[in-house]
């Protein structure tokens, strides 16, 4: 009898525990959302950069999968944590320049998608390499009515000159979003502008999309 | 005389290239910054083969297998020489505070850090500068000149390459009387430089559609930024 009871009770208990766990997870999710929504709408650009980069660094330092170099996990982290704070359309338009203005909506969409993937993969490898550094956040002096600003940060490396990482940010209906990252004076958007111009000259916008897609599919750079 | 100072032959080749490039000046060209693109791309192709098959694997093995402490000591030792040149160029650019920091670093690390093997100055919180002759020329208003890619040495410009040659002929390493010691130090210094570029290089590989183009723009942006100490004038937008 007792044996019977136990054998029935045990799975029930486990189910209960799982249900409780799911409940905790949902609550945590709701809490995160509640925190995230006003943050997106009102958060000042420098506070946003600090929060997002600190969160990302925290995960990089503590998540065992990330530390083991699990590329899928790193990409997923960037996709959920970082890319929502980047204005990919604006970055694409800036990098592609004149070609973007004459592109069809379909081309723009595909170009944006491919560029986003490439940026994500680039950040994946960059983050993985610089995970042991500390970041110093520079105070932001900004007109409250401004819609465009630069948030300045500095990566401190012992025995080597620090590296400045600046984020060009614009105000959007979904809060402040970065449209360029400047690492040690090297603007990503400016760098891609040369690359994109070259590809468009060789094969038009479709040629550029094709090159990006090939690169994202794992093809090495020329 | 050159051999007495021990600058490697390659720096002489670079000097000659710089002269040729200066003579050619700003002839009408496919790109404003890179009028010698076909020549540079050929040089880059040579570099890829030699570096990729010989130098890079050695640098990678050095990073993977040499004891951390040895790597740190070597990087500090050559960093100390960098600081010396940063001091000289801080003076040439009339930046007394920066120059003072760099001089303080050189004295501290040379005197108390076993000729620079230990970077005591960083632990004491003295900031490390990174001025060089190319930046000094830029600060004086000398334009960068055509972009150049030199096999085994990497991207440069006529202005920066000239600065590099000056440094190669004046570095303390060149004044070491014992030839084998001097040559070994040249070799280790080169390996150290190459090893330090590995991280940035792997990001470049991931980021670029065409490594040559990406590296060129990254290099030129970086140099412009350094010349203006982190506040370069906004780039001219020739697309509008």
Image: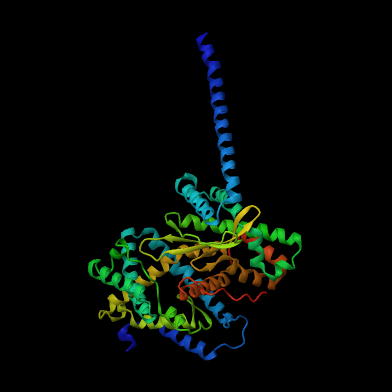
The furthest residue to the front:
A144
The furthest residue to the top:
A1
Position of B8 with respect to A66 (left or right) is: left
Residue A180 is at least partly visible in this image = no
Query: On the rendered image, what quadrant is the N terminus of chain B found in?
Result: bottom left
The quadrant in which residue A158 appears is bottom left
Residue B178 vs A65, above or below: the answer is below
Position of B64 with respect to B108 (left or right) is: right
The furthest residue to the bottom:
B23
Query: On the rendered image, what quadrant is the C terminus of chain B found in?
Result: bottom right
The quadrant in which residue B38 appears is bottom right
Q: Measured from the top left, where is residue A98 in percent x and y?
A: 70, 71
Residue B65 is at least partly visible in this image = yes
Position of A142 with respect to B10 (left or right) is: right
Position of B117 with respect to B143 (left or right) is: left
Q: Measured from the top left, where is residue B205 in percent x and y?
A: 54, 64
**Which one is in front, A177 or A210?**
A177
Q: Measured from the top left, where is residue A36 in percent x and y?
A: 58, 45
**Which one is in front, B172 or A155?**
A155
What residue is rendered at 57% in x and 65% in y?
A188
Q: Measured from the top left, where is residue A187 in percent x and y?
A: 55, 67
């Amino acid at each position: 009898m007792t044996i019977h009871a136990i054998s029935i009770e045990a799975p029930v208990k486990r189910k209960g525990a799982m249900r409780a766990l799911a409940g905790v997870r949902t609550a945590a999710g709701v809490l995160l959302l509640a925190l995230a929504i006003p943050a997106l709408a009102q958060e000042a650009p420098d506070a946003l950069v600090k929060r997002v980069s600190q969160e990302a660094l925290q995960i990089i330092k503590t998540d065992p999968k990330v530390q083991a170099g699990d590329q899928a996990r790193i990409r997923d982290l960037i996709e959920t944590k970082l890319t929502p704070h980047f204005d990919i359309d604006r970055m694409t338009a800036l990098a592609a320049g004149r070609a973007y203005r004459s592109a069809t909506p379909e081309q723009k969409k595909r170009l944006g998608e491919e560029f986003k993937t490439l940026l994500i993969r680039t950040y994946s490898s960059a983050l993985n390499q610089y995970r042991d550094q500390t970041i110093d956040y520079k105070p932001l002096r900004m007109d409250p009515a401004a819609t465009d600003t630069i948030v300045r940060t500095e990566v401190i490396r012992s025995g080597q000159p620090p590296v400045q990482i600046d984020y060009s940010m614009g105000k959007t209906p979904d809060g402040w979003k970065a449209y360029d990252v400047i690492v040690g004076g090297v603007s990503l958007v400016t760098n891609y502008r040369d690359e994109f111009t070259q590809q468009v000259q060789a094969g038009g916008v479709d040629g550029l999309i094709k090159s990006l897609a090939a690169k994202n599919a794992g093809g090495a750079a020329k | 005389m050159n051999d007495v100072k021990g600058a490697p032959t390659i720096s002489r080749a670079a000097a000659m290239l710089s002269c040729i490039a200066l003579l050619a000046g700003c002839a009408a060209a496919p790109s404003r910054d890179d009028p010698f693109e076909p020549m540079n791309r050929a040089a880059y192709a040579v570099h890829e083969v030699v570096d990729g098959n010989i130098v890079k694997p050695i640098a990678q093995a050095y990073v993977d297998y040499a004891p951390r402490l040895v790597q740190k000591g070597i990087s500090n030792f050559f960093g100390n020489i960098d600081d010396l040149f940063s001091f000289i160029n801080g003076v040439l650019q009339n930046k007394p505070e920066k120059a003072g920091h760099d001089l303080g670093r050189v004295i501290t690390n040379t005197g108390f850090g076993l000729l620079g093997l230990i970077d005591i100055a960083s632990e004491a919180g003295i900031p490390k500068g990174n001025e060089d002759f190319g930046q000094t020329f830029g600060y004086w208003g000398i334009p960068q000149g055509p972009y150049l890619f030199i096999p085994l040495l990497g991207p440069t410009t006529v202005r920066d390459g000239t600065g590099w040659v000056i440094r190669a002929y004046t570095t303390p390493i060149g004044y070491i009387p014992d030839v084998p010691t001097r040559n070994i130090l040249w070799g280790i210094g080169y390996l150290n430089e190459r090893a330090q570029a590995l991280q940035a290089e792997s990001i470049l590989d991931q980021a670029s559609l065409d490594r040559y183009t990406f590296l060129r723009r990254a290099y030129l942006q970086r140099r412009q930024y350094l010349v203006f100490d982190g506040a370069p004038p906004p780039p001219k937008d020739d697309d509008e």
